[in-house]
Image (cartoon, rainbow, N blue to C red):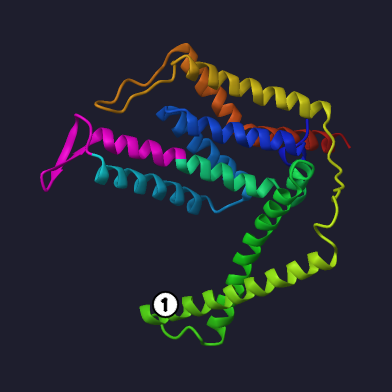
């Protein structure tokens, strides 16, 4: 078995679609909580992000979602407090937290997606189906980190040259506007240069081909079957109503039937699949090196 970054791109995109689609379509707080926690762990382990920063971001999104929901929704029987004769209910708070957990889980999965799905993998998947879409996706994924890196360079140059002034709010606004103007000009110039370069190379005048070294191996077929099986173990209980959960008018009991518990375990394994593969690959290599 290979590590997650080395498997076929079709298997990878199938995994991401299954992981994100399940948490978006399943209205169950346990699924959202498991997805949020497991996807956060995968994001920290794979991308080597700062753990505290990633955890703080997830908590901030969940808290903001819960607060926004109790402001606009006052349904529910369990009233926590009245604010100007407006009830703040436990059910609205729980539903907002549930929505925030689902959002953070999708964001974490998307973050890992952008790290794994490089431009050559996107071209391999969409190159034959829709070359223009593949080119647009690959250029977008490449432009975003490049734009962030260039913004940091411009900000550092402004700070070193003394163009940031003091720390007052008006100076910060002027510095931000100056950096934004520089980045807008740079983006337009880069777009013009890219368009001229593509025109000079005859882009759009004939059908383009793409070379790739990706092959669909037996391990990819086994992994595809595993992802499909884990997804089915989540989808079937949800379709049969074993994962149904109602927040209003009062929160129901969390489903804990055998089918529901199976779905919880299957989805946790599905989310943690990249970490499981990478850990198995690391253990295998350490074992082989110990035999040398």
| Left or right side of 174 for 155 | right
Residue 100 on image: x %, y %: 40, 42
Callout 1: 10 Å neighbours few (<14), some, many (20+)?
A: few
Residue underneath mark 1: 173
Q: Residue at x 31, y 28 (%)?
A: 247
Give whichever of 283, 203 is nearer the camera.
203
Count of all numbered marks drawn on residues in the image: 1
Q: Residue at x 23, y 34 (%)?
A: 75
Residue at the extreme front: 205
Give whichever of 96, 270 is nearer the camera.
96
Q: Which residues are magenta?
A: 74-102
Q: Is residue 120 magenta-colored?
A: no
Residue 53 on image: x %, y %: 49, 54
| Left or right side of 69 for 236 | right
For residue 282, say whether it is visible.
Answer: no
Relative to 62, is 196 above or below? below
Give whichever of 13, 50 is nearer the camera.
13
Q: Residue at x 69, y 54 (%)?
A: 136
| Left or right side of 260 for 1 | right
For residue 198, say whether it is visible.
Answer: yes
| Left or right side of 57 for 129 | right
Residue 121 on image: x %, y %: 75, 45
Q: Is residue 92 magenta-colored?
A: yes
User: The C terminus appears in which quarter of the rendering?
Assistant: top right
Residue at the extreme top: 258
Relative to 205, is 45 above or below? above
């Amino acid at each position: 078995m290979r590590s997650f970054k080395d498997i076929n791109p079709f298997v990878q995109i199938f995994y991401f679609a299954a992981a994100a689609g399940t948490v978006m379509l399943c209205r169950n707080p346990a699924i959202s909580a498991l997805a949020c926690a497991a996807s956060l762990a995968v994001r920290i382990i794979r991308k080597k992000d700062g753990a505290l920063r990633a955890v703080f971001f997830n908590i901030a999104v969940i808290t903001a979602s819960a607060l926004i929901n109790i402001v606009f929704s006052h349904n529910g029987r369990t009233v926590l407090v009245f604010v100007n004769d407006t009830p703040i209910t436990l059910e609205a708070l729980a539903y907002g937290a549930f929505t925030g957990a689902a959002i953070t889980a999708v964001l974490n999965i998307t973050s890992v997606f952008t790290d794994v799905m490089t431009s050559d993998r996107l071209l391999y998947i969409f190159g034959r189906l829709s070359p223009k879409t593949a080119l647009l996706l690959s250029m977008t994924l490449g432009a975003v980190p490049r734009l962030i890196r260039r913004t940091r360079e411009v900000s550092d140059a402004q700070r070193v040259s003394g163009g940031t002034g003091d720390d007052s709010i008006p100076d910060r606004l002027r510095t931000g506007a100056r950096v934004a103007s520089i980045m807008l000009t740079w983006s337009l110039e880069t777009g013009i240069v890219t368009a001229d370069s593509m025109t000079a190379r005859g882009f759009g005048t004939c059908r383009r081909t793409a070379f790739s070294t990706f092959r669909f191996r037996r391990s990819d077929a086994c992994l595809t079957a595993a992802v499909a099986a884990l997804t089915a173990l989540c989808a079937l209980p949800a379709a049969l109503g074993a994962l149904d959960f109602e927040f209003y008018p009062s929160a129901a009991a969390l489903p804990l039937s055998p089918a529901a518990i199976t779905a919880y375990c299957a989805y946790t394994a599905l989310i943690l699949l990249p970490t499981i593969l990478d850990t198995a690959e690391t253990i295998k290599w350490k074992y082989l090196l110990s035999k040398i």
